[in-house]
Amino acid sequence: MHISRRTALMAAGSAAAAVPLIGPRPAPPPPDPEATLDQIADAFSFQARSPVLHTPDERGLEFEDVTFPSRDGVPLEGWFIPAPGSDRLIIANHPMGFTRSGLPTHLEPWHSIWAASGNGFEVDLIPDYRILHDAGYNVLAYDLRNHGTSSAANGGISSSGILEARDVAGSVAYARSRPDTRDMAIGLFSRCLGCSSTFAAMTLFPDAFEGVRCLVGPQPVTASVIMGRRLAAIGLGDRLADLEERIRIRTGIGFGPRSPRQWARNVHVPTLLYQVRDDVLTDPSDVRTMFDNLPVADKQLQWIEGTTARWDGYLEFQRRPEPMLAWFAAHMS
């Protein structure tokens, strides 16, 4: 049964990830294109971990360090942040390459990787949890496999949501196993890779999400789109198929099976997506297609204007949380 589910998912199509862009304008091809393609394929296939540099107590939040199994038993690490007297729980994950605490892009080596695309500033996600707590929500924030302090799995490969889907399902199962959270209303705050993984989990394990009230999903993205943008920016726009073959050799998964656009067809909870419209790392048509494919009537797509930096999308909640809080409140009261 497990094999048939994975086969069905991988037949669906192409996925989400956040991969560095060399620069926002097209450039001449690099002097050694083959070596460059190898380096990009290595970085995409085996994401370097970033550290968990912040903790909830920095924002005055009490928290519990927790560990729980993914659906396939991989140990995941996270925080449970209680809101005494509340019967509502938000489960939060993170973008590719990030952790539950964010990404220290103001520090090396991350700054050199991301600054050219306008994303050279830190994303600290702890303020998000403070806002949710103050709005009356318990929070479970966790690191996906091969990220943060969660365990390594599957040879360390990045699958753009196919394998990480098991972590999303595991987080919901964990919440329903704790005596203090098992009867709470659950909402999902799934960011980028975490959102694509949520789409995939709802495709693979639909029964695991029975009773989940809603989803807020910042910036899901399709792997072939973001990698095509990156290659175009370094003068290798005609080499996407060659890059895909390198990634397939390293991970066993090409762009085709990595498909949040197709997985979105299996999302049956009220969903709010939001995205930087002019994000240099992707194209607005990508998230628009995901939104259009959502089969639910209760859905909303919110654009972030006035910036080309993807990181601004990850900081949108702590800058202007009202639409997201209103979405949670409307579906979790």
Image (tube, grey):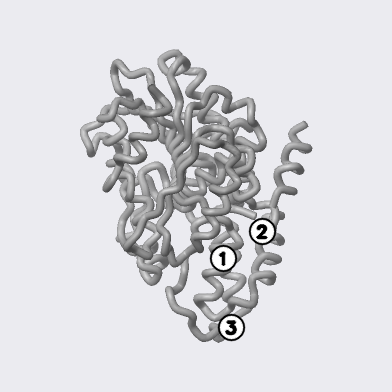
Counting residues from the start of the chain, the first of labels 3 and 1 encountered is 3
Please name the residue shown 43% across and 74% down the image: 23
Residue 274 pos. (x, y %): 43, 49
Counting residues from the start of the chain, the first of labels 2 and 1 encountered is 1
Q: Which residue is mark 2?
A: 255
Closer to the eye: label 2 or 3: 2
Residue 138 higher or lower than 313, as above or below:
above
Given the current orientation, which residue lies at the most extreme front position? Answer: 297
Given the current orientation, which residue lies at the most extreme left position? Answer: 60
Do labels 2 and 1 touch, CB within 8 Å? Answer: yes
Q: Secondary structure at mark 2?
A: loop
How many residues crowd around disc 2 within 10 Å: few (fewer than 14), some, or many (20 or more)? many
Residue 32: assigned label = 3
Say which amino acid is labelled 1: Met
327 sits left or right of 37 in the view: left
Instruction: Give the alpha-carbon distance from disc 2 to disc 3, as whole Å.
Output: 24 Å
Image quarter of residue 250: bottom right
Please name the residue shown 49% across and 60% down the image: 284
Q: Which residue is mark 1?
A: 227
Q: Secondary structure at mark 3?
A: loop
